[in-house]
């Protein structure tokens, strides 16, 4: 096997033994494994040959790109790991057609930098963007902070190229905005976490890069009030709200404790603290006035003042300069630090309908108190997407209680029509939740599709679909 | 069979013999057929029972809703036609969550009217919206004039409910903006034209309804220039361009000939005539000034004047009132009348990458002259989506020439990375194109999925996938 792999990619691109070290765990070190070999193909043809070989020999294949996933999706015990890292070219940027053509191993922040030179933005953005690669973003349909305006990864993708489990290359590198010619295999592959094939390339949509941002901290009277506020802001800005992030009082307090030099967002404490950001591309919004402020900031201030007079806003601070904007974002971006400041932590990445976030939080907090009195929630939320990162600091900390808390969260989520995995995917971490909670008819359809496209079960086996 | 169907829906909802008349042809009368029976279920449970019966007896099932399709997708010779017309309820509108929950037989224009009462819009819009039903829109992933801003039907849909070929009900009625829990079956079902199941309900995304429009006719120096113009307008308006429709000089001239009382859009004739519309929701854009004009119109005028001084615009007229706006739209909406004014017509609904529309038109026109000297193209295009309705008025009119022209168009489309079916779907009309042109690996994957989900081949057989 190793010889055959070496014949495909050259010996230097087949790693075994001690050389696989950095490929044998996820980045949080929650999972460890020993792959059969790590192969670093340099082209789609090489990926196809590797997969063909694996399929013929019944060897498991696990694709990996930036290895920044949070769900154990790249575990590869005894498998051939196919690392896309050498396929990192940004093949083409066509500014007029607003698209970029990239290989799967291109690092997200590199793609973002390359298109910025053309005044454009590829708006996918999240913490790990300096090492995450687009192939993994596509495999997991990554989300992040700007989904509200631009959508998830799938919404930012015109086309993909995929090596299927039999080693055939499926060229769906469409540059089209409209194409109704058969089943949408692009959307089937995106988010399938490497279990239906290996994504090797993509055509990405680009947007005009905002030339100015208006950013504010806003205190809302309630979560329902915050949703009204979001809808009014969307109307007032023509849908230009890029981020709408919720931090409850408990989060703000913990942030003050944990991060040196951090400050209160408002003069008085509030329960519902919102970070809102509006992006502007139009010269009428972006050209600074005599006072150095941009019209988009002044406009946001006016809108917030109006909402204040109607009671939809309790307090608001609009960033007057980039430093103030950075301070606002720093509070939100400290989420990992804040959440992990009191281990152990149980992370729950859930989504509910926009108008049910308040109900979810009430019920979840009550459930905590019931199951583990003294347990504490630590919450931060992409409120505009209904996505809540509901971390729990348990009091009891035994595995049984931890499990009951997770099941408790899932139960409430399901009752409210939500999802137990909003943006991190299933991998292996969420397999028990899939088994417990996923619609049975949908699960049967997924299994049928998996069996049809990967009859030998070689592609990232044991991920996404729990054992029958 | 008929008795069993009657037992499911009641005798009055099973039509046979002379009663199936209006269900036995498509709305253009291009196709005629005789169904075994037409059944009109009143609930998802009834749909499921019908499909289960059909699956057990190996009887073909063809779903139909508004029957406004253009590709022969509802042909039902000898099949049970399942008409969704009785399932036409708009179950719920939740303005704060920006969503509507509807049954598959709800008529598109009824949905649009119902949500307008809440200051919202369901932005799917096209000619047949007064009779087209949402189930068919979802089955074909309908497009239309506002795709540029809001996307195709799939982009406007949070969740669906589907009866699968075995009669099981797949509840994907998600109200979520983020959900990464397994394969995306919603996107697989949408656009599958009833061959993988019957869509019975949907959760639709709603948007703030524009309270003012700025509409203009613009003459651009070239098609490439028009694309630059679109990109500048998107920047200047923060992505608020709702429509960007291209009409060449030949279209404008034919419109003048065919439609009584129609007028030239500009003082002088131009080759590249663009209808552009910007939608505004913000009070700063929509509140009329002392002259009765809205700020959004004045802003569009300013932007166009700037582009004029740079040579990106040759001439422009901004509508000063609703009557002028209607006149601009009437020219575009007369497309069917203009195109059909000289039968026979060969319609080609194609898409190419945004920056290749000009190349497509040059090559297609040259191909016409080569194959059928004297043949004439009649073109109108959703230019902002790269979607060209390339109608041909053949000179020779024999079937062989007609076929060679269609193949010629397809060949050019494929060379440019385009699609032979942009928004109308495959149905039966485009089966030869699928067989000739669709990527073979993708086709094999589609067949595998079809066989996995519909092993008895009962769901809308003979559509989308050509015979192997």
Image (spheres, coloured by chain):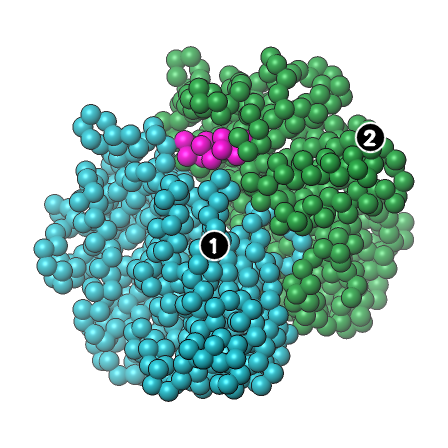
Chain colours: A cyan, B green
Q: Residues within 10 Å of mark 1 (few under 14, many from 20)?
A: few
Task: Determine the secondary structure under disc 1.
Answer: strand
Q: What secondary structure do most residues of the magenta stretch adopt?
A: helix
Q: Residue at (16%, 59%) from the top-left corner?
A: A255
Along the viewing direction, whichever of A147 and A315 lies nearer the viewer: A147
Q: Residue A184: percent from the left, percent from the top?
A: 60, 58
| Mark 1 and mark 2: Cα distance apart in space | 42 Å
Q: Please tell me how crowded label 2 is: few (under 14), some (14-19), or many (20+) other residues with Cα within 10 Å.
A: few
Q: Is residue A450 left or right of residue A11?
A: right
Decide if residue A176 is on the left or right side of residue A281.
Answer: right
**Residue at the spot 37% in from the left edge and 87% down from the top edge:** A17
Q: Is residue B367 depicted above or below A432 in this figure?
A: above
Looking at this view, is B375 or A4 the one in front?
A4
Residue that numbered label 1 is attached to: A91
- Rendered image quadrant of residue A403: bottom left
- Residue receiving disc 2: B374
Residue at 42%, 22% in the rendered image: B306
Seen as rendered, the residue at the extreme left is A261
Q: Residue at x 53, y 71 (%)?
A: A46
Chain letter for mark 1, please: A
Quadrant position of the C terminus of chain A in the picture: bottom right
State the image quarter where residue A392 is shown: bottom left
Q: Is residue B239 visible?
A: yes
The span shown in magenta is B226-236
């Amino acid at each position: 096997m190793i010889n055959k792999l070496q014949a495909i990619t050259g010996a230097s691109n087949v790693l075994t033994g001690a050389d696989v070290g950095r490929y044998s765990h996820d980045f949080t070190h929650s999972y460890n494994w020993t792959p059969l070999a790590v192969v670093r193909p340099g082209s789609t043809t090489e990926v196809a040959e590797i997969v063909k070989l694996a399929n013929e020999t019944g060897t498991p294949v696990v694709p990996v790109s930036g290895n920044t996933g949070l769900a154990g999706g790249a575990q590869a015990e005894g498998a051939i790991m196919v690392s896309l890292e050498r396929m990192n070219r940004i093949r083409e940027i066509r500014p007029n057609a607003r698209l970029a053509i990239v290989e799967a191993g291109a690092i997200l922040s590199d793609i973002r930098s390359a298109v910025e030179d053309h005044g454009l933005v590829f708006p996918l953005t999240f913490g790990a963007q300096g090492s995450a690669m687009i192939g993994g973003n596509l495999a997991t349909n990554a989300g992040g902070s700007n989904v509200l305006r631009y959508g998830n990864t799938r919404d930012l993708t015109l086309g993909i190229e995929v090596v299927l489990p039999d080693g055939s290359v499926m060229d769906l590198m469409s540059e089209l905005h409209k194409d109704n010619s058969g089943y949408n295999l692009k959307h089937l592959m995106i988010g399938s976490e490497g279990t239906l094939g290996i994504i090797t390339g993509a055509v990405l949509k680009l947007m005009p890069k905002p030339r100015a941002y208006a950013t504010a901290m806003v205190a809302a009277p309630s979560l329902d009030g915050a949703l009204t506020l979001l809808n009014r802001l969307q109307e007032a800005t023509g849908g230009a709200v890029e981020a709408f992030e919720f931090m409850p009082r408990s989060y703000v307090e913990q942030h003050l404790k944990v991060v040196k030099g951090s400050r209160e967002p408002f003069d008085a404490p509030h329960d519902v603290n919102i970070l809102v950001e509006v992006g502007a591309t139009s010269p009428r919004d972006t050209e600074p006035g005599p006072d150095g402020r941009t019209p988009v900031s002044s406009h946001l201030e006016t809108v917030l003042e109006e909402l204040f007079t109607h009671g939809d806003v309790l307090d608001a601070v609009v960033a007057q300069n980039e430093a103030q904007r950075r301070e606002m974002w720093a509070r939100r971006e400290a989420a990992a630090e804040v959440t992990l400041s009191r281990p152990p932590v149980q992370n729950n990445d859930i989504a509910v309908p926009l108008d049910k976030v308040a109900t979810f939080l009430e019920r979840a907090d009550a459930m905590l108190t019931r199951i583990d009195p003294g347990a504490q929630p630590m919450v931060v939320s992409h409120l505009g997407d209904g996505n809540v990162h509901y971390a729990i600091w348990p009091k009891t900390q035994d595995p049984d209680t931890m499990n009951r808390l997770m099941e408790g969260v899932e139960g409430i989520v399901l009752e409210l029509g939500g999802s137990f995995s909003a943006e991190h995917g299933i991998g292996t971490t969420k397999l028990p939740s899939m088994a417990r909670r996923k619609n049975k008819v949908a699960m049967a359809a997924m299994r049928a599709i998996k069996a049809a496209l990967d009859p030998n079960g070689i592609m990232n086996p044991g991920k996404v679909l729990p054992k029958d």
